[in-house]
Image: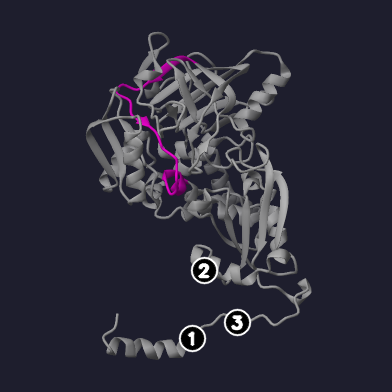
Amino acid sequence: MAYNDLREFIQALEKAGELKRIPFEVDPRLEITEFADRSVKGGGPALLFEKPKGSNVPVLINAFASMKRMQIALEVDSVEEVAARIVEFLETRMPEGILGKLKMLPKLAEVGAFFPKTVSTGPCKEVIRKTGFSLAEFPVLHCWPQDAGPFITLPMVFSHNPENGKRNCGMYRMQVYDERTTGMHWQTHKQGAEHYRRLLREGKQTRMPVSAAIGCDPASMYSAILPLPPDLDEMMIAGFLRTKPVEMVKSETNDVLVPAHAEIVLEGYVTLGELRREGPFGDHTGFYSLDDDYPVFHVECVTHRKNPVYATTVVGPPPMEDFYMGKGIERIFLPLMRLQLPEVRDIAMPAEGIFHNLILVKIRKSYPGHARKVMHSIWGTGQAMFSKVIVVVDDDVDVQNFSEVAWKALNNIDPQRDIEFVMGPVDSLDHASRLANYGSKMGIDATRKWPQEGFTRPWPDVITMPADVKARVDEMWRKAGLR
């Protein structure tokens, strides 16, 4: 059965030995970050701080910070199971004949069962506060020394497309300015920013209603970071992941629906045209993202459960919790990439590449220039457009083995011939680009070169030992008492 809320997820983590309770006081300013950083880099558990300094609200962190925890979150033995389900439902060929179509009906009904369900109320409404509240009551982390202040790092931010009313849920950091005001870090490529721009252009209203939920069932939280096409409802995808619809309830002060089982909900609005300096912030690049102007979120109402839990995360020098969340995306979306690029056999995004800086791609090469076609296809696909460096290798290379990729790629390339540069959109957090959001990207064709690509020299084989020799030495190795 799907988790109803964050609390059931916490119970599952604890039952699996993946959670450690911290019963003494720890400061949300820097100290919890240091705990979380040491735990994830040392292969430690998720952490539940029961007495954060200055607050009565416990803090959950590192809940997704291992592949085992990702499996617990998605209730699978392997995240590839999710990928297989998605591919099955996205199969484009309709079956032939009436019998085949009838067999499809149960699947279509199942898809309909995943759509969010609107309810009249929910646990997130146990406490409703339109006056007398302060964001300072919550243990919002001041993560790193040069951060501009405390940041809400794991919010599910809900807004609506003003043209068609479709919902978007994104995870955008929120710098806490004061008791009732935060930043809204809508990077220019994100859907929340697009909704804001459209309303600004229309000029018909001065406010954009927004609600942010903190601490939900793990599938709903995870769906907020998935690189989905615009206007595809993240809560429908969450229902698909958890095989149960997400219950949604109307906010108290606006028409935005939020998960009914959320721990905390911040309701309010963004004033169109109002900008404020946001940042610096110790980001997932491992560097501080620079301060810049971003919209401002005004909190009008706070609703929460009795005795809520504050779910958060911290990003910084990799690997951290976001690496494992990204690894899940890599495995889940590989089959979807292969629907468009069937020649792709596997991909890998090393932790040091912080998702957008490096993607390794293994292909089944079928024609001259095939590697370059794949590079440009990836640059033209959704958030993969931010890939700063793409390395394409042949299908005899294990892209999950970064040492093997480096060895074979560095041997296979002639730098002038096999490296190409393109200009285009880059991640907003890329501090090295010549302009904000715009810069260069590099593709490396590390495949074996063909005569049809102008390579006329012999191409050598990789050194390997015959299998029969290995088998004979296996026996002698044991006989010699070697390990």
User: Hey, what amino acid is under mark 1?
Assistant: Met
**Three-letter amino acid code at disc 2?**
Glu
Q: Which residues are magenta?
A: 299-325
Q: Quadrant of residue 218?
A: top left
For the point 44% across and 40% down, the residue is: 315
Q: Quadrant of the C terminus?
A: bottom left
Does the stretch in magenta take in 324?
A: yes
Residue pointed to by mark 2: 404
Which residue position is annotated with label 3?
461
Q: Nearer the viewer, residue 210 or 136?
A: 136
**371 is higher (above) or lower (below) than 334:** below
Query: What residue do we see at 60% from left, 29% from top?
Result: 192
For residue 4, above or below residue 270: below
Q: Report crowding for label 1: few under 14, some 14 to 19, many 20 or more residues within 10 A (C-alpha).
A: few
Residue depicted at x 54% and y 66%: 405
Q: Earlier in the sequence, mark 2 or mark 3?
A: 2
The crowding category of the residue bearing disc 3, from other C-alpha atoms within 10 Å (few below 14, some 14 to 19, many at least 20), is few
Report the side of 40 relative to 401 (left or right). left
Q: Name the residue furthest top.
A: 131
Query: In x, y percent, where is residue 417?
Result: 73, 66
Q: Is residue 223 left or right of residue 59?
A: right
Query: How far apart are the alpha carbons under marks 2 and 3?
Result: 15 Å
Task: Identify the secondary structure beneath mark 2.
Answer: helix
Kind of residue indicated by mark 3: Asp
Q: Nearer the viewer, residue 113 or 390?
A: 390
